[in-house]
Amino acid sequence: MRTPKIEALNRLIDWFNLKYNTNLEKLIIDTSDLGKNAWLSGFSDCDSCFSCFFNINKTGIAKDIHCYMRLSQRQNYNIKNSTIHKNNNQSVDNYPKLGNNYYFYVMEKIIIFLNVNNLRIIKRIRKDNFIESGYEIRKSKKESNKILINYLNNYPIYSSKYLDSLDWKSMFKIKINREYKENKGTKLLIYLKSSINNSRTNFNWEHLNNFWRI
């Protein structure tokens, strides 16, 4: 685990060890290279979306195309125990000293890996009109998209969002190869955009055949 949620996991381990007289090990926070494991893929599966925005000119051709992935996460995590990794001598004090903004550390690692310019601060309305502060990564520049595509080729998403990622890659290809300059390319761009995220009606789960082969 890379986020401060490991604190909750370790509290559960403490409870389990005490109740059942076991000695389950508590691992330290993972700080390995983001590009060398599937963690970011799983994180994106939960908290990201793939999008493409463009306008249509007077002749019906797409223009001002922006292919981006948006990834968001709350700012704060309220530590309920003074120690995150008691058995490994890695305490909350060893986590970056950012008040309760522990997720900043994780999101900062992601923007560095994806070569994104900045991390946005957002406000989200939750249940009972509770306003939650969060961080948002929105990457659209060509270099960042290429990094993400290469990463997802090695560590694919496995939910239906995988299908969105494929369509998003196709839209990015249309942009890079300037296929949208032709009527056929623009029509395909419009079709792909209208078929992703909440608008998706066609699902294919063949990619799960390789789920255990990563």
Image (cartoon, rainbow, N blue to C red):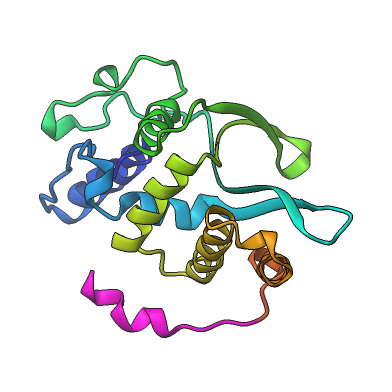
User: Which residue: 58% across, 27% down?
Assistant: 120
* Left or right: where 35 falls relative to 157: left
* Left or right: where 182 falls relative to 107: right
Q: As rendered, which of 139 and 32 lies closer to the eye?
A: 139
For residue 42, above or below residue 162: above
* Left or right: where 100 falls relative to 40: right
User: Which residue: 52% across, 71% down?
Assistant: 163
Q: Is 171 part of what is drawn in magenta?
A: no
| Range covered by the magenta-colored residues | 202-214
Residue ranking furthest to the right = 58
User: Which residue: 34% across, 62% down?
Assistant: 153
Question: Which quadrant holds residue 91?
Answer: top left
Q: As rendered, which of 179 and 56 lies closer to the eye?
A: 179
Q: As rendered, which of 69 and 192 lies closer to the eye?
A: 192
For residue 106, above or below residue 38: above
Q: Quadrant of the N terminus?
A: top left
Q: Residue 198 location in percent, x, y? A: 69, 66
Q: Residue 109 location in percent, x, y? A: 35, 32
Question: Which quadrant holds residue 135?
Answer: top right
Q: Quadrant of the C terminus?
A: bottom left
Q: Is 204 part of what is drawn in magenta?
A: yes
Q: As rendered, which of 47 and 151 lies closer to the eye?
A: 151
Question: Which quadrant holds residue 59?
Answer: bottom right
For residue 175, above or below residue 5: below
Q: What count of labels does the image hold?
A: 0
